[in-house]
Image (cartoon, rainbow, N blue to C red):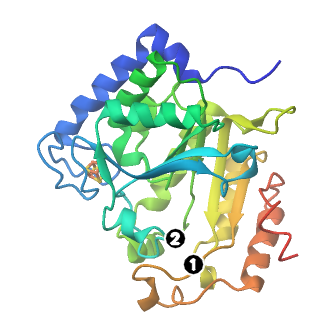
Amino acid sequence: MGIPPPAYLAAHKRGTLAKRANQALAALRQCSLCPRRCKVDRSRDASGICRTGRLARVASFNAHFGEEAPLVGENGSGTIFFSHCNLLCNFCQNYDISHLGEGTDVSDDQLADIMLQLQGAGCHNINLVTPSHVVPQILGALEIAAGRGLALPLVFNTSGYDSISTLKWLDGIVDIYMPDFKFWDENVAHNTCHAPDYPAAAKAAILEMHRQVGDLRIDDASGLAYQGLLVRHLVLPGGLAGTAKVMAFLAQQVSRNTYVNVMAQYRPCGTARQMKPLDAALSTAEYKQALKQTRAAGLTRLDVARRVFQLW
Ligand code: SF4
């Protein structure tokens, strides 16, 4: 059967993609794109929490081989790292990009060119990293790129701090959702990123994402993912991420077939060095415990090939 064409091509032909791009762009004038609901006019300035105005800012783009196996294949995942962020965790491993905003402003036309360059380089998908605050710019660029021949699956690689109304614009556009589910406890969310509503927002967002695209589907012949949900969970020291509860939620309320990457790579970055227990790296024992909790929840589709073998 092979890999079906990406969802946005049909939306482009029907005119739905252009319509959504226009709606999203208009929403920048009183921005409530994400749960922060800053209500600032981003067509005039960049005074919201994400510090992003009309133009998206790109920190880097390249064929990336460090992503999950079903995204990487032989030629890599075509990652576009957007600068700034709407969540701003104090332990962010890309602090210079997310908090300090390193990068270059790009027009929608330039962003479309970046997508096409990644396709030209042989990448297997377009992987939008930290995209929540630049959905209008992404939709505008996608409309241009689809008209110029873009035909790769679109990956929405997000912190999970997304609004349902914004995700509705992406229904029938995004092929693969790759949200984090970072922490279960609202006090932890408050202390690390001033977003006590993060757990509630992430739960609602992940349910909506799964409603749109279902479980992750992988092509047998190539081993490449082409549609569905892939959840990432970074295990934090001291049990701060609430791994057991996150996994129970995924298994019981999303799907037991949820594809999950339980990540072991936590190390103190940003300002987390000043906060216990985030001032220490994750121990092997803590990671093993998180894996045990994941399996106990009934989840079996784990992205473990490269990261876990060293620890077991
Ligand atoms: S996208 Fe940015 S400006 Fe808009 S609500 Fe979120 S943080 Fe605020």
Note whether residue 165 is visible: no
Note whether residue 17 is visible: yes
Instruction: Specify few, some or many for label 1: CA neighbours under 10 Å numbering under 14, 14-19, or 20 or more.
Output: some
Name which residue lies at 76% across and 44% down.
74
Q: From the viewer's perspective, is 46 left or right of 141?
A: left
Identify which residue, 185 or 209, lies in the foreground: 209
Instruction: Specify few, some or many for label 2: CA neighbours under 10 Å numbering under 14, 14-19, or 20 or more.
Output: some
Mark 1 CB in 8 Å range of ligand 1?
A: no
Amino acid type at image mark 2: Asp
Occupied quadrant, residue 177: top right
Helix, strand or loop status at disc 2: loop
Name which residue lies at 63% across and 45% down.
77
Q: From the viewer's perspective, is 218 left or right of 280?
A: right
Helix, strand or loop status at disc 1: loop
Amino acid type at image mark 1: Leu
Marks 1/2: CA distance? 8 Å
Spot occupied by residue 170 in the image (x, y as percentages of width and height): 47, 31
| Residue underneath mark 2 | 185
Name which residue lies at 42% across and 20% down.
17
Up/down of 223 relative to 62, above or below: above
| Residue underneath mark 1 | 240
Q: From the viewer's perspective, is 112 left or right of 302?
A: left
Up/down of 59 relative to 21, above or below: below
| Residues at discs 1 and 2 in contact (Cβ within 8 Å) | yes
Q: From the viewer's perspective, is 92 left or right of 300?
A: left
Up/down of 85 relative to 311, above or below: above
Spot occupied by residue 229 in the image (x, y as percentages of width and height): 65, 42
Closer to the eye: label 1 or 2: 1
Spot occupied by residue 1 in the image (x, y as percentages of width and height): 83, 18
